[in-house]
Amino acid sequence: MGDERKNENKKQEQLEPFKVDDAKKHLTTNQGLKVTNDELSLTAGERGPTLMEDFHFREKMTHFDHERIPERVVHARGFAAHGHFETYESMKDITKAGFLQKAGQKTPVFVRFSTVVGFRGSADTVRDVRGFATKFYTEEGNYDLVANNMPVFFIQDGIKFPDVIHALKPEPNNEIPQASSAHDTFWDFVANNQESAHQVMWLMSDRAIPRSFRMMQGFGIHTFRFVNDQGKTHFVKFHWIPKLGVHSLVWDEAQKIAGKNPDFNRQDLYDAIENGDFPEYELGVQVIEEKDEFAFDFDILDPTKIWPEEDVPIQVIGKMTLNKNVDNFFAETEQVAFHPGHVVPGIDFTNDPLLQGRLFSYTDTQLIRLGGPNFHEIPINRPVCPFFNNQRDGYHRQTINKGKVAYHNNSLIANTPMPATEQQGGFAHYQEKVEGRVIRSRSESFNDHFTQPKLFWNSMTPPEQQHIKDAFSFEVGKVKDRNVRQQVVDMFANIEHELAAYIAEKVGVTVPNKHAVDNQKSSQALSQTHFAFSPATRKVGVILANGFSDQEIVEILDQLTASNIQYEIISDHQGKVTGENGTDLMVNHTFTTTNAVLYDAIYAGGGKETNQAFDRSTTEYLEEAFRHYKALGATQEGKEWLKASNIQVGAGVIEEKGAKQFAARFIEAVAAHRHWDRVIN
Ligand code: HDE
């Protein structure tokens, strides 16, 4: 255990010497010179010109002028945290990866979540794929699992990546719209690149508007290989499964949050970690034996396909816990450099043509973004094990390599640093046999673009299907070119006629003939209802006015806390609210500094001292939360507010008598996440 504890903290220990605390120190230049004044430039006379010799001014301004680096070309907006991964049981049988050999083994990790399309300053809650990139600092070097929150991708070949991203990003003539796929070029791409169908179904589903980074899955997408110490390989897909379940916002709410708090998802992750509610994700693998490579009715190398869990079950092999926020966003979150090609012995690639394309792109992009070939020396990117080679020099080199030999082979230092054998931990690429002609062509086994999207559709519950219909209607409805709208509807008629007909009607184009692919199968694991539901770490807005009924409220709030629900007290003024028997509670927000969309549920607790403005704000909060299918609770005067909002009890609207009974039912309603059976007029 001692050793494991040591490993778990190894990255933090490595980062420590790089940290600087400026508090209570003298201000100096970067040369260490103490300065006497930081507010006035050096001038010739009090009203005269600034002097060239003002090195302090020049240094300060030059550094400022160079503060920005290019944002990532995709996944520009992200948020990251530190943590560790714990292996549940030895995976020795199928992989020799050092960090998966022993139960209880711990490996430090750094995880960056992101949106794909928006610029660095865009909103968190846009409809988009989310990145979920994990760097494992293993004893054998860094292993990066650079994943997304959806299990398939838009394209099958890396060479098309610039095309899909050009179509998805804001249109180049006017740079509109920001962080959105709801525009002509994206949907034109979709209709003319039908391999995108499966990913687009996921993108139109609730998965694209996660409630929290803590409540979304991660998928390695590609098929990788596990290799054991006998050299035997298995095909493998990676899954992250959040312990809190998989939950999403509703679209109207997501759009409003983008204005009310564009940092909604990052704030949520930051606060959870600060509160000690450490997010946890289990790592699962799907494994296929090499002999079964062709046993499926899809190509297992095709990144637009999933392996249905009914056919290839997930085996859970470990758990990741995120338990530390970064100290400095730029130094850590912005400078971290992931790469799907950062592997360790025991994990290898396949010929998935998308993966092969990625293996080139990631180093290349860091060279421009981080400004040279030494980005591996930036503290967040350094492996925790030592590294030695004959690479030298380049911008911002930090390592001071001693001696005069920087080549191989040599005799001066006994031909070192020397390659390792596999037994010594050297990485040897899997010796896959390959042969073929040099061609630009793809196997026919990649050509079925509609069977699996249909599986996805079949697997959705009715509310999830309705959300997909609405999302398509919104997005395609934003497309100005009628011809593109028609092409999209015609394309999705290949998957589900009901869906295509619905969109056609909404976006004003012709309903296509029935010609959907024949697939009746469904997979429960694709629906978000398949995952955990829990009240833990949910956020409740509690509306109180002066004169609330002390005893009942205090008891209910205690019950919420006991279920690890976070609550904030909302009133019409800051400071405190006082109960009828003199209990003071601190107000967290006024109606104007927060909003109903920022909570999972609203509890109208009551209070006697209200006025018309108070009542109107309360009604707005309750109606908004009701429209977004959230749990609502009311006690005492709160019941009057509910009545004024014309909201009926039932379907997640709780008005139970007695603090204990109320709290129990309300907490249950919060845990349910949303109440889809509610009728909304
Ligand atoms: Fe990426 N991707 N990608 N990608 N990707 C980048 O690398 C690329 C793909 C993913 O938080 C870039 O460092 C190509 C699939 C994540 O820092 C760039 C192709 C998946 C992140 C790049 C893909 C991903 C990136 C931009 C098709 C899920 C953010 C900045 C061949 C399995 C990592 C950077 C972070 C970032 C290229 C497809 C996930 C340009 C060429 C599939 C999570 O190199």
Image: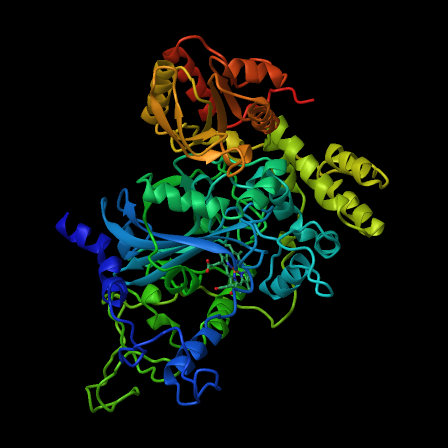
- Across and down, in percent, residue 415 comes to 23, 85
Query: In which quarter of the view is residue 229 placed?
Result: bottom left
Nearer to me, 326 or 393: 326
In which quadrant of the rendered image does the C terminus lie?
top right
- Across and down, in percent, residue 486 comes to 82, 46
Query: Residue at image x 84%, y 40%?
Result: 508
Q: Is residue 567 above or below residue 218?
A: above
Task: Using residue 3 as the reference point, say whether residue 517 is left or right of it.
Answer: right
Q: Is residue 470 above or below residue 68?
A: above
Query: In which quarter of the view is residue 96 placed?
Result: bottom left
Nearer to me, 325 or 343: 325
Residue ranking furthest to the left: 2
- Across and down, in percent, residue 506 comes to 79, 37
Nearer to me, 607 or 77: 607
Residue ranking furthest to the front: 46
Nearer to me, 602 or 112: 602
- Across and down, in percent, residue 7 comes to 21, 55
Task: Using residue 257 as the reference point, say whether residue 213 is left or right of it.
Answer: left
Task: Using residue 471 as the reference point, say whether residue 523 is left or right of it.
Answer: left
Query: Residue at image x 40%, y 53%?
Result: 80
Residue ranking furthest to the right: 510
Query: Residue at image x 54%, y 65%?
Result: 357
Query: In which quarter of the view is residue 512 placed?
Result: top right
Q: Is residue 23 above or below residue 324?
A: below
Task: Using residue 356 as the reference point, say whether residue 38 is left or right of it.
Answer: left
Q: Is residue 154 above or below residue 492?
A: below
Whether residue 650 is visible here, answered yes or no, is: no
